[in-house]
Amino acid sequence: MKVLIKNIGENTKITDIENDLQSLQNLVGGYIEALPLTKDVLLICNEEGKLKGLPVNFNIVINGKIESIVGNVFFVGKNDSDFDSLTNEQIVILQDYLDN
């Protein structure tokens, strides 16, 4: 599955990962939390990141509220009931926001 990774202090990078829980948890260093950004894009972060005091990665508006996103995160596409690869268009939009 094609995802976009945003590690702390780094620009984004595109990579392919397996769509299994262990692979997803390895990317964020713990339990995952899926935050909907749009109807077909999810932000995946460490569920306990703020409790563990992980450093801020970036700020983003979610549901009209500015949220500080902590720790290493990645973005995936969403289909009806599962994670999916991002499209090239989604990747360009995300990179435009995160890398500039």
Image: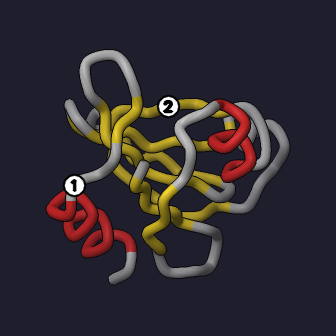
Q: Is residue 62 visible?
A: no
| Residue depicted at x 47% and y 46% | 67
Q: Which residue is mark 2?
A: 34
Is residue 95 depicted above or below 45 in this figure?
below
Quarter occupied by residue 38: top left
- In this rendered view, identify the residue nearer to me: 13 or 97: 13
Is residue 20 depicted above or below 4 in this figure?
above
Q: Position of 53 compared to 95: left or right? A: right
| Residue depicted at x 78% and y 48% | 29
Q: Percent position (x, y) of residue 24? A: 63, 41
Q: Is residue 52 visible?
A: yes
Q: Secondary structure at mark 1?
A: loop
- In this rendered view, identify the residue nearer to me: 89 or 85: 85
| Residue depicted at x 64% and y 61% | 56
Q: Which mark is residue 87?
A: 1
The earlier-in-sequence mark between 2 and 1 is 2
- In this rendered view, identify the residue nearer to me: 50 or 25: 25
Q: Are marks 2 and 1 in contact (CB under 8 Å)?
A: no
Q: Which mark is residue 99?
A: none
